[in-house]
Image: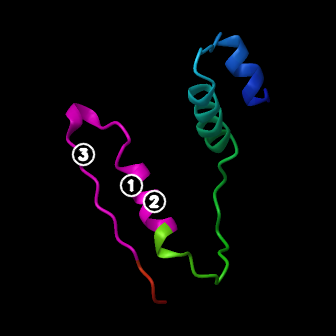
Amino acid sequence: MKKPTAILRELNVTSNDNSEEENTMQVYTAAWRRRTIRKFKQRRIPYRVIKKMIRGATRSPSAANMQPWKFLVVDKK
């Protein structure tokens, strides 16, 4: 399995804006390291973190810009 940096080099990903390249790498690395989790910690996630994650998710592309997202935050067991 190739490392994310090797794949980005193969794709000849370059940018004059370092922050854009860093952001691209962070997103790619997060997707590359994604795993299915079946056991969860009982730790409460701060509301500001949840809000930030939802805000980021709504910026994702959608077919015909329909934006069909629905989010449900459950804070009690």
Q: Is residue 76 left or right of residue 39?
A: left
Name the residue at 47% across, 58% down.
Answer: 53
Q: Quadrant of residue 39?
A: bottom right
Amino acid type, mark 1 = Arg
Q: Quick one: 6 or 51, which is closer to the camera?
A: 51
Q: Is residue 43 above or below residue 27?
A: below
Q: Position of residue 12 (x, y in %)?
A: 65, 10
Mark 3 nearby-residue class (10 Å; few <14, some 14–19, many ≥20): few
Q: Residue furthest bottom?
A: 77
SS category of the residue bearing label 3: loop
For marks 3 and 1 on the same chain, the one whose residue lies earlier in the sequence: 1
Q: Which residues are magenta?
A: 49-73
Marks 3 and 1, how far apart in space? 13 Å
Q: Quick one: 1 or 29, which is closer to the camera?
A: 29
Mark 3 or 1, which is nearer the eye? Answer: 1
Name the residue at 62% across, 15% down.
Answer: 13
Q: Quadrant of the N terminus?
A: top right
Marks 2 and 1, how far apart in space? 5 Å
Q: Is residue 65 left or right of residue 34?
A: left
Q: What residue would you read off at disc 3? A: 67
Marks 2 and 1: CB-CB under 8 Å? yes
SS category of the residue bearing label 2: helix
Name the residue at 70% across, 12% down.
Answer: 10
Q: What residue would you read off at disc 1? A: 55
Q: Position of residue 46 (x, y in %)?
A: 53, 75
Q: Is residue 10 above or below residue 17?
A: above
Marks 2 and 3, how far apart in space? 17 Å
Q: What residue would you read off at disc 2? A: 52
Mark 2 or 3, which is nearer the eye? Answer: 2
Mark 2 nearby-residue class (10 Å; few <14, some 14–19, many ≥20): few
